[in-house]
Amino acid sequence: MTNTARQEGFILPVVVSCLLVVGIIAGGTIQYVLNGTRVTGVYATATQCRLSAQTALDIEKAEIFRDFKAYAKAYPSTWNLLGWFDTYGVQSVGAGSYASALMEAQTVNGCTVTVSLTDVERSTSAESQQYARLTLRATASCASPAGIPVEKIIEETVEYALRRSSVFDYAYFINNYGWFMGGGVTANGDIRANGNMYLDGQSWVNGFAFAAANSDLGAAGYIDGTARYKSIADYWAENNLRARPTSPTSLNGLTWAMGYEGLSELYSYQEPVEMPFLGDLDFYREVANNTGSSIKQNGKTIVDSCFSGTGPSGLADGADKGCLVLDGTSKPIEIDGPVVVDGDVIIKGTVKGQGAIYAGRNIYIVGNVSYSSSPSWAKPDTKPNQTVTQNAKSDMLGLAAKGNIVLGNYTDSTWLSSVKNYITPPFVKAYECDPTDASIGYGSVFNGDYTAKDSGKKVEYVQNSKTKEWEPKTTTDRRYYESTAGNRVISQLAQSSAITRVDAVLYNNHATMGKTGACQFNGALICRDEGIIYSSSVKFNWDIRLGSRSPDGIDFFIFLPMSPATPRVVGWQEVQ
């Protein structure tokens, strides 16, 4: 009995000690697990807060862009569109009725989030890229499962910019009904209408066609008809050096973004692409003055940034003051950068350089307009990078009018009889106009009759009975398609044969109209109404240097009209 008692006395402390150790270990393990659970919960909640903050920033970026685009659409002629960002507070962005309230203590993905605007940086000169950079701060807070408060702060700097409008991605863009009729139309490039598109089935569309709904017109945005298109092999065989390149550029060659892929698809019921109107030309005047833009003829500078001088009549205070004649038939017209002409522009002949002409009213193309050094795209092309370099130096002309672009000699009796049905109702529908076009005869709503009188005057020439010279003596009422410079100036300058070539990017607020021969347009045609009557055929060769995604998209900036670009993030940081 004595030995057994001793053993029992020894075992009990050992067991108790073991239980104590196990308890300590178990307690530590539980505490470790609990602490780990708390930490894991905090980490998970922190991730939730980050995601909530980022989600809030993405929502705000989209809402700000939506409001900015709505403002740009409502005030398309405002030259300082980015001034919209100048009026802001920590809880709002934008000006006037388009101010966008930022989130304040709102629930996003289970977290409470507040977004504030901490800084706005604006571009300061007109000739540089136009942008506003907003720094947005999102603070997200939430309690972890264990009740521990967690907060995360993220900042993003977002660039809202104006870039060349996407309407220039098309060979033919109509802010209305589009039509390829007559069996002789070819588009080497994409085409688009903010309205229904009519295709006769005999025309060629070597690219995509788009039609968009337009509530102003009551248009559903459908494509009526079909078009033909060429295979890449047939496209190459045509050997049209002015047509855009293909993708691939040759057999087993390189891809070329926005190049022709040998396909043509018709897309109905698309979203409309907004066409920015030319409004007050002060922005372009500022650009022209800051960049020292010019036009030269016969080695003499005739436009130094802006032109508001004596017109072709020679009368200092004539009705045609601010109208300009550009004749490059003997020596090229030399253009450098964007220039502004207060009145009408009358142009023909060879053009050299890179730039744009903004006309306060109409532009009259009274003869062929051709580049001195044209871009070209060999087909097939085994050295596309070399092609890009060469074309970057080639000529480019933009012709942009607040009024119309008129082709051919409108004083010829056959001109009006050919064109009239396509520049009057019911073919032309009534539409709302930019308020700044009131000075050239357009009210808040234009009835669609371009043959009507616009309340303006044109110079009238009378023959001197003694000298037999025609002299500017008086003025008469002017029609929308007529020049302020007078019908005699147009008839004298117009080439005797039909127009067969126009090398330019054509853009205007109202109509491109007129009569041509078998004509090639090398550039792009963008307008609201289109009434071109051609003889035999008409071809639109899109200048791919205008492409927003093209490898040879122009680095030189000739200041074609701009519109809001998709915002991009230029800075990101987690503050806390």
Image (tube, grey):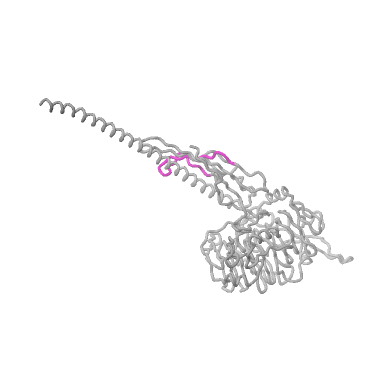
Q: Position of residue 125 (x, y in %)?
A: 67, 45
Residue found at the very far right of the displayed protein: 466
Q: Position of residue 507 (x, y in %)?
A: 66, 59
Residue nearest the observer in this picture, 402 or 45 = 45
SS assignment for the magenta stretch, majority: strand
- Horizontal placement of 178 versus 313: left or right? left
Residue at x 26% of width, y 33% of height: 22
Residue found at the very far left of the displayed protein: 1
Question: Was residue 113 drawn as part of the magenta stretch in this picture?
Answer: yes
Q: Is residue 400 visible?
A: no
Task: Give the quarter of the image for residue 405.
Answer: bottom right
The mark total stands at 0
Q: Position of residue 82 (x, y in %)?
A: 61, 46
Does residue 63 sit above or below 91 in this rendering? Answer: below
Q: Is residue 20 visible?
A: yes
Residue nearest the observer in this picture, 93 or 457 = 93
Q: Position of residue 183 (x, y in %)?
A: 61, 74
Residue nearest the observer in this picture, 148 or 404 = 148
Residue nearest the observer in this picture, 92 or 369 = 369
Does residue 20 sit above or below 181 in this rendering? Answer: above
* Quarter occupied by the N terminus: top left
Question: Was residue 401 drawn as part of the magenta stretch in this picture?
Answer: no
Point out the stretch of residues depicted in magenta: 100-120
Task: Give the quarter of the image for residue 134.
Answer: top right
